[in-house]
Image: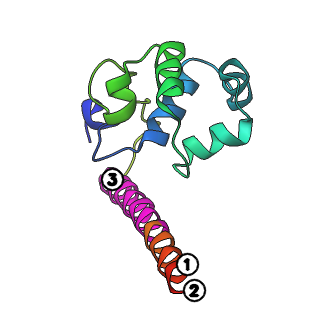
């Protein structure tokens, strides 16, 4: 893994980039949440990829964290540098991290699909009744 792909779309999620940019700006979750006017739990949900901010909050986040909106969403554009690697790590650690992030993304996508199917089922049952 190189510095340039640490936060890219295939390696990191939106939440990973948000947390990384927040930490690089020296802000706690609570501090950033207060500045944005949202609950800390809401910010935590964004960083955990359980929820996504609305467009106006995305723009505010990019400005407050001094990153481009494109980087925050996709990892492309003006963002932060990759975190320093502490000490000598085994060669396969970066491969494991990439695979873990990929699985995390797949799980998130599966959760979204499950929610869509649940909504579709509720509508079908409503029409049936």
Q: CA distance from mark 2 to mark 3?
A: 47 Å
Q: CA distance from mark 1 to mark 2?
A: 5 Å
Q: Is 108 contained in the magenta span?
A: yes
- Residue depicted at 33% across the width and 60% down the height: 99
Whether pointer 1 and pointer 2 mark residues with C-beta atoms closer than 8 Å, the reply is yes
- Residue depicted at 34% across the width and 57% down the height: 102
Q: Residues within 10 Å of mark 1 (few under 14, many from 20)?
A: few
Q: Which residues are magenta?
A: 91-115
Q: CA distance from mark 3 to mark 1?
A: 42 Å
Comes first in the chain, label 2 or label 3: 3
Q: Residues within 10 Å of mark 3 (few under 14, many from 20)?
A: some
Closer to viewer: mark 3 or mark 1 = 1
Report which residue position mark 3 lands on: 98
Q: Quadrant of residue 107?
A: bottom left
Query: Looking at the picture, how far across and down is residue 20, in whole percent?
Result: 50, 31
* 60 versus 119 height, above or below: above
Report which residue position mark 1 lands on: 126
Label for residue 129? 2
**Of helix, strand and loop, which one carries label 1?**
helix
- Residue depicted at 47% across the width and 36% down the height: 86
* 126 versus 32 height, above or below: below
Front one among 14 and 42: 42
Q: Quadrant of residue 103?
A: bottom left
- Residue depicted at 73% across the width and 36% down the height: 40
Query: Looking at the picture, how far across and down is residue 83, in whole percent?
Result: 44, 30
Whether pointer 3 and pointer 1 mark residues with C-beta atoms closer than 8 Å, the reply is no
Front one among 95 and 22: 22
Tell whether 13 sits left or right of 29. Answer: left
Label for residue 58? none
Instruction: Give the position of the N terminus as an image quadrant.
Output: top left
């Amino acid at each position: 893994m190189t510095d340039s792909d640490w936060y890219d779309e295939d390696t990191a999620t939106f939440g990973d980039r948000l947390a990384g940019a927040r930490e690089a700006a020296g802000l706690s979750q609570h501090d950033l949440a207060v500045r944005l006017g949202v609950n800390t739990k809401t910010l935590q949900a964004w960083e955990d990829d359980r929820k996504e901010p609305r467009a106006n909050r995305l723009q505010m986040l990019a400005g407050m964290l001094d990153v481009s909106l494109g980087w925050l969403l996709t990892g492309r554009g003006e963002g932060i540098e990759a975190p320093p690697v502490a000490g000598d790590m085994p060669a396969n650690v970066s491969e494991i991290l990439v695979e873990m992030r990929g699985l995390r993304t797949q799980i998130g996508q599966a959760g979204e699909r499950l929610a869509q199917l649940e909504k579709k089922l509720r509508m079908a049952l409503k029409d049936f009744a």
